[in-house]
Every structure is written in structure tokens, then in C-alpha cells.
């Protein structure tokens, strides 16, 4: 197992990538904020299927956090992450410092369009501008042929796909399925911060998603689907930001009846000070 190259600034990432591409190799990138888990490893596996070389970026991006306490509390486990990447056969890790990403005088922000205005966009003001800007910067530094993102962050994936298309960035965006714990909880770096009590209550999210799928199979009635999910999630969570049916293309909530294969239930809820998000397509296939 060879140790991945550690690239600490955009110039180093650009030249590593350029040398590989000149050698005729395809490169893929898996952008992460570290505290890697099996969900991230599944993206690395998917990336390998698309390319000759896999890059992983690890950067806890301050501009996508709308709360300073959340940024400060975000788990940072860089040594373990490097070891996991090494064992997964990752070729290079882009590990920039905040100063390398946002030097003094940095002043440019990408403002994503309407998809970014709902749900996460409402509850986390500025979040998607931070995400879109950092992802474009990561893609310009690593210049991958393919970048792999998890459908766990479904709205993020939609915002990124739109941004990359609109800016004519020549990277193919690939979405990968959500990896879950045995009891259904979606894997997340934030799960490390859950108390044992909150960890066990958080399994209600997955039960709520499954209840929504069952309800959608019966009638497709949007209100009824949301009520089915809430019946599981509401008693377990400390508070709920949204439990909503959305059209996967627009992130608009349909009125009346929805088509299960083009709609998803999306959830954001708090458990003992930890904010968790999850989603499932209403046909239950993803
Ligand atoms: P993060 O480090 O949380 O910013 O996530 C980095 C990437 O991993 C994003 O594309 C996420 O959607 C993806 N990801 C996070 N959790 C999971 C999971 N449980 N299954 C699959 N992908 C995930």
C-alpha cells in the first residue's frame, strides 16, 4: 500500500493533476470535510471505478458553516483520515489550509440559483454559496475528470450539478447512494457527536423515511406522506426543521399527489445539539 501524496495548496494539486493527465490518466476527486467513515469510503470505491487515479480532498470549509459553534465542534481526525485513505488506495489527498483557500483579500463568491433557496438554504443562510464556491475551487485545483458526491446530501448534489453545468466546468458529477448503519441511521461525521440517548433516538429518521415510502405506495398524497414520516420522527427528535416531500429536480414541494420515483422525502432534525439530515426517494429505491 503506497502512502498518498499530500498536497497542501492549489498550486501543488494543479501540478500533480496536470502530470497525471499528461500521462493519459483519468482522475477522480472525492471532496470531503474529513472525519471519514464508510460512506466516504464508498465514494472512493465509486471514484476508482471511474478513473485511474483517485484524489480525496479534506477541508473543513469555514464559509459553508452558518454557525461558528458548529464549525468549531466539527470533528477533525486528519491522521486517521490519511490512514483510511492509504488503506483505500487513494493516490493523493488535497489538504489545503484555510489560508491557502482564502488568502487575505479573497473576495469572490458563487451565488447558486433557485434550488439553493429552499430547505437547507432557508435554514442555513449562506451555506450553499459557501459550498458552491469551495467545490468550484476544489475542482479548479484538482481538475478531475469526475467528482463523486453522496446523495445523502441530496440538495447539495443538485446545487453542485447546476453550478458545474452553468459554469461549463469540464468535470462529470457522479452521485452515489447513502451508506447506513445496521439500524438505518445514515452515516455522518456528525454522528460522532451524538450522545448514546440521541444516537438511539436518531434511528427514528430512517423509520420515518420508510413510513413515507409505504405511504407513497398507497396513495401518493403529499400531506399524508409527510404525516406518516412525522409520526415516527416527531416524538424522537428534540426539534424538526423540515420533514417534506420535494420534487428531486426542483426541490419544490408538490401540492396534492406526487410521483414516487421523481420525489423524495427530506428531513432535517436536531438530536441533543446535533443537526442530522437524511432523505429517501419515495419509490424506496434510493
Ligand atoms: P462531508 O465530509 O460530510 O462533507 O461529506 C463528503 C461527501 O460524502 C459528500 O458528498 C456527502 O454527500 C458524502 N457522504 C456523507 N455521508 C454519506 C453517507 N452516509 N453515504 C454516502 N455518502 C455520504
Image (cartoon, rainbow, N blue to C red):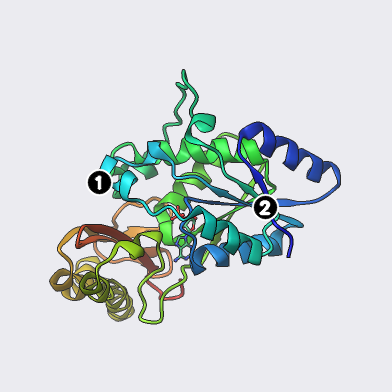
- Regarding residue 113, the answer to whether it shows in the image is no
Residue appearing at x 17%, y 72% in the figure: 236
Asked if 233 appears above or below 113 in the picture, the reply is: below
The label number, if any, that marks residue 204 in the structure image = none
- Regarding residue 187, the answer to whether it shows in the image is yes
List the residue tagged with mark 2: 28
Label whose residue precedes the other's in the sequence (1 or 2): 2
Image location of residue 126, percent across then percent down: 33, 36
Image location of residue 214, percent across then percent down: 31, 81
In the picture, measured across the screen, residue 3 lies left or right of residue 158, that is right
Asked if 218 appears above or below 9 in the picture, the reply is: below
Residue appearing at x 26%, y 58% in the figure: 274
State the SS at label 2. Answer: strand
List the residue tagged with mark 1: 123
Dividing the picture into quadrants, the one containing residue 116 is top left
Asked if 256 appears above or below 60 in the picture, the reply is: below
Query: Is the residue indicated by label 2 positioned so its CB lies within 8 Å of ligand 1?
Result: no
Question: Quarter of the image containing the N terminus?
Answer: bottom right
In the picture, measured across the screen, residue 242 lies left or right of residue 102, that is left
All told, the count of numbered labels is 2
In the picture, measured across the screen, residue 73 lies left or right of residue 106, that is left
In the picture, measured across the screen, residue 40 lies left or right of residue 272, that is right
Q: CA distance from mark 1 to mark 2?
A: 31 Å
Nearer mark to the viewer, of 1 and 2: 2
Q: Toward the viewer: 156 or 219?
A: 156
State the SS at label 1. Answer: helix
User: Do the residues bearing badges 1 and 2 touch, measured as CB atoms within 8 Å?
Assistant: no
Quick one: label 2, few (<14), some, or many (20+) residues within 10 Å? many
Q: Toward the viewer: 191 or 173?
A: 191
Quick one: label 1, few (<14), some, or many (20+) residues within 10 Å? some
Residue at the far top in the pictured view: 105
Amino acid at each position: 500500500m503506497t502512502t498518498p501524496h499530500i498536497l497542501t495548496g492549489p498550486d501543488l494539486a494543479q501540478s500533480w493533476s496536470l502530470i497525471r493527465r499528461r500521462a493519459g490518466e483519468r482522475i477522480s476527486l472525492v471532496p470531503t470535510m474529513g472525519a471519514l467513515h464508510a460512506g466516504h469510503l464508498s465514494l472512493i470505491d465509486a471514484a476508482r471505478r471511474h478513473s485511474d487515479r483517485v484524489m480525496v480532498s479534506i477541508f473543513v470549509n469555514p464559509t459553508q458553516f452558518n454557525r461558528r459553534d458548529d464549525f468549531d465542534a466539527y470533528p477533525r481526525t486528519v491522521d486517521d483520515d490519511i490512514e483510511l485513505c492509504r488503506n483505500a488506495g487513494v493516490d493523493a489527498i488535497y489538504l489545503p489550509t484555510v489560508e491557502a483557500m482564502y488568502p487575505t483579500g479573497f473576495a469572490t463568491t458563487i451565488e447558486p440559483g433557485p434550488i439553493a433557496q429552499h430547505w437547507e438554504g432557508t435554514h442555513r443562510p449562506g451555506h450553499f454559496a459557501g459550498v458552491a464556491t469551495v467545490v468550484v475551487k476544489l475542482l479548479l485545483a484538482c481538475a478531475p475528470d469526475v467528482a463523486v458526491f453522496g446523495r445523502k446530501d441530496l440538495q447539495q448534489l443538485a446545487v453542485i450539478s447546476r453550478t458545474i453545468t452553468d459554469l461549463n466546468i469540464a468535470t462529470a458529477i457522479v452521485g452515489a447512494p447513502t451508506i447506513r448503519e445496521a439500524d438505518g441511521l445514515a452515516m455522518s461525521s456528525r454522528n460522532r457527536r451524538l450522545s448514546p440517548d440521541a444516537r438511539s433516538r436518531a434511528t427514528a429518521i430512517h423509520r420515518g423515511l420508510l413510513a413515507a415510502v409505504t405511504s407513497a405506495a398507497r396513495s401518493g398524497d403529499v400531506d399524508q406522506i409527510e404525516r406518516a414520516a412525522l409520526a415516527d420522527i416527531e416524538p424522537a427528535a428534540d426539534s424538526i426543521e423540515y420533514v417534506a416531500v420535494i420534487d428531486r429536480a426542483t426541490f419544490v414541494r408538490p401540492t396534492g399527489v406526487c410521483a414516487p420515483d421523481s420525489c423524495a422525502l427530506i428531513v432535517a432534525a436536531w438530536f441533543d445539539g446535533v443537526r442530522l439530515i437524511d432523505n429517501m426517494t419515495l419509490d424506496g429505491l434510493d
